[in-house]
Amino acid sequence: MATSLKNLSDYSQTNMVDVSTKKFAIVVAEWNAEVTEALFNGAYQTLLKEGAKEENIIRKNVPGSFELTLGAQWMAQNNTIDAVICLGCVIQGETRHFDFICNAVAHGLTDVGMKYNKPVIFGVLTPNNQEQALDRAGGKHGNKGDEAAITAIKMLGF
Ligand code: DLZ
C-alpha cells in the first residue's frame, strides 16, 4: 500500500519546529502550469496552516523542471532561507526528455541539499499523463505540494 505524508503527525519521530520563525523558498516550474500551480497552492496553504508567515515564503518560477536545480541553488545559497521546496511536473512522453529531465533534477536537487546542508525538497510529479498528474495535484490522490511542504517542515525538525 502506498504511503504519504499528509500531516506533521504522520510517522513522526521529528522534533517540533517553530514554523513561524522559518523562511521557505518555493521554486515552481512553468511547464504543465495547471498542475504546478495546483502544487504551489497546496504547498503554500500547507505552510501557512502550519504557522509560516506570508512574508517568510518566497516564490520563484523557472521555465521547466530541468531548471529547478539552478533555481534551488540560487535560493539555497541565501543564508536566510531555511528550506527550499521544488515543484514540477514531467509528463512521460515519446521522447527521451523524460528520463534526462527526471534524472538530472533528482541528482541536481540532491546535490544542492548536500552542498548547502539544508532541506531541498523534490516535489516533482512524474506521471504518465495529465490526468494522473491532476489526480496528484489536488485530485483523488491528494496534493503532492502539501506533502512537499510537510516534508520540508519535518526535515527542519530532524
Ligand atoms: C523540454 C521539456 C519537455 C519535453 N517536457 C517537460 C515536462 O514535461 N515538464 C517540465 O517541467 N519541463 C519539460 N521540458 C522543459 C525542460 O524542463 C527545460 O525547461 C528545457 O529542456 C530547457 O532547459
Image: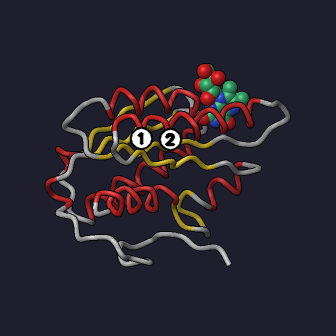
State the residue at coordinates (36%, 32%). Answer: 60
Which quadrant of the figure shows ligand 1?
top right
Quarter that holds the N terminus? bottom right
Which colour assignment does the render follow? secondary structure
What label sits on residue 113 in the rendered view?
1
Residue kind at label 1, given as amino acid type: Gly
State the residue at coordinates (39%, 73%). Answer: 7
**Mark 2, secondary structure of its residue:** helix
The residue closer to the viewer here, 14 or 68, is 14
Residue kind at label 2, given as amino acid type: Thr
What label sits on residue 110 in the rendered view?
2
Classify 10 Å Cα crowding around label 2: few (below 14), some (14-19), many (20 and above): some
> Where residue 6 appears, x then y in whole percent?
45, 71
**Mark 1, secondary structure of its residue:** helix
Side (left or right) of 92 relative to 24: right
> Where residue 155 appears, x then y in whole percent?
35, 58
State the residue at coordinates (28%, 63%). Answer: 157
Asked whether disc 2 touches disc 1, contact meaning CB atoms under 8 Å apart, the reply is yes
Classify 10 Å Cα crowding around label 1: few (below 14), some (14-19), many (20 and above): some
